[in-house]
Image: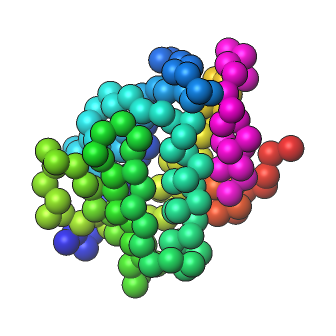
């Protein structure tokens, strides 16, 4: 287990944001911890369907409602297990058939909340500017509000 706090980044590329049916939107989204890209660099997933559950799950761990949660990617057998650490930080274990599951990364709550908030806001802006239709818009806005609450930022109106 890594005792050193590592920076976690959530990369999203809305340049390839597209409607994939049933109101869902996909684009590039992946995590980076140091030199590790997860599930892999350039991963494309149903961002409109994973942002809200992740925001709720991460918030529940940070707020102490649950001890741990598994945040799943929609495309493929990939997820990350997030647990509260005694230090107030979070422990993250990356889970995929091709990834070593022996390492637990210690990350700051503000990094994962801030990264997910930035991703959600970028997706929301892209939806508005490109006038994309999605049944997930309300859930995305709920996720943005939850993440802003967690980070101490004011809600958008």
Q: Is residue 132 magenta?
A: yes
Residue 112 vs 45, above or below: the answer is below
Residue situated furthest right in the rendering: 157
Answer left or right for 94 relative to 9: left
Q: What residue lies at 80% left-to-right and 45% top-to-bottom?
A: 156
Q: Is residue 129 visible?
A: no
In magenta, the rendered stretch is 128-146
Please give the name of the residue rendered at 34% of the width and 56% of the height, measured from the top-left corner: 80
Classify residue 87 as left or right of residue 132.
left
Give how far across and how far down residue 96 sits, in percent.
22, 49
Q: Answer with the quarter of the image where residue 140 lies.
A: top right
Check the image and name the residue furthest to the front. Answer: 22
Majority SS type along the magenta span = helix
Asked which quadrant contains residue 141, the reply is top right
The outermost residue toward the bottom is 86
Q: Quadrant of the C terminus?
A: top right
Vertical placement of residue 43 versus 20, above or below: below
Please tell me which residue lies in front, 130 or 109.
Answer: 130
Quadrant for residue 84, please give it: bottom left
Q: Is residue 142 above or below residue 16?
A: below
**Residue placed most toward the observer, 44 or 87:** 44
From the top left corner, tell me how far across and down residue 121 is, in percent.
64, 37
Its colouring scheme is: rainbow
Quadrant that contains the N terminus? bottom left
Identify the residue shown where x is 59% and y is 60%.
56
Indicate the position of residue 66 as horizontal and vertical percent values. 50, 77
Q: Is residue 97 left or right of residue 68?
A: left
Of 137 and 61, the residue lying toward us:
137
Q: Do we see residue 101 in this rendering?
A: yes
Total marks in image? 0
Tell me what residue is drawn at x 72 percent, y 16 percent: 131
Q: Does the magenta segment cover residue 84?
A: no
């Amino acid at each position: 287990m890594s005792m050193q706090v590592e920076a976690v980044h959530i990369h999203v590329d809305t340049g390839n944001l597209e409607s994939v049916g049933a109101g869902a939107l996909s684009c590039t989204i992946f995590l980076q911890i140091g030199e590790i890209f997860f599930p892999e660099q350039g991963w494309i997933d149903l961002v409109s369907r994973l942002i809200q559950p992740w925001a709720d799950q991460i918030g529940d761990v940070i707020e102490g409602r649950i001890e741990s949660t598994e945040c799943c990617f929609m495309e493929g057998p990939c997820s990350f297990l997030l647990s509260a650490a005694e230090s107030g930080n979070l422990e993250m274990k990356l889970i995929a058939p091709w990834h070593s599951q022996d390492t637990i990364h210690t990350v700051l709550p503000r990094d994962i909340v801030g990264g997910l908030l930035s991703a959600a806001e970028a997706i929301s802006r892209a939806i508005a500017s490109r006038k994309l239709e999605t049944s997930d818009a309300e859930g995305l806005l709920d996720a943005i509000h939850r993440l802003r609450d967690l980070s101490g930022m004011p809600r958008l109106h």
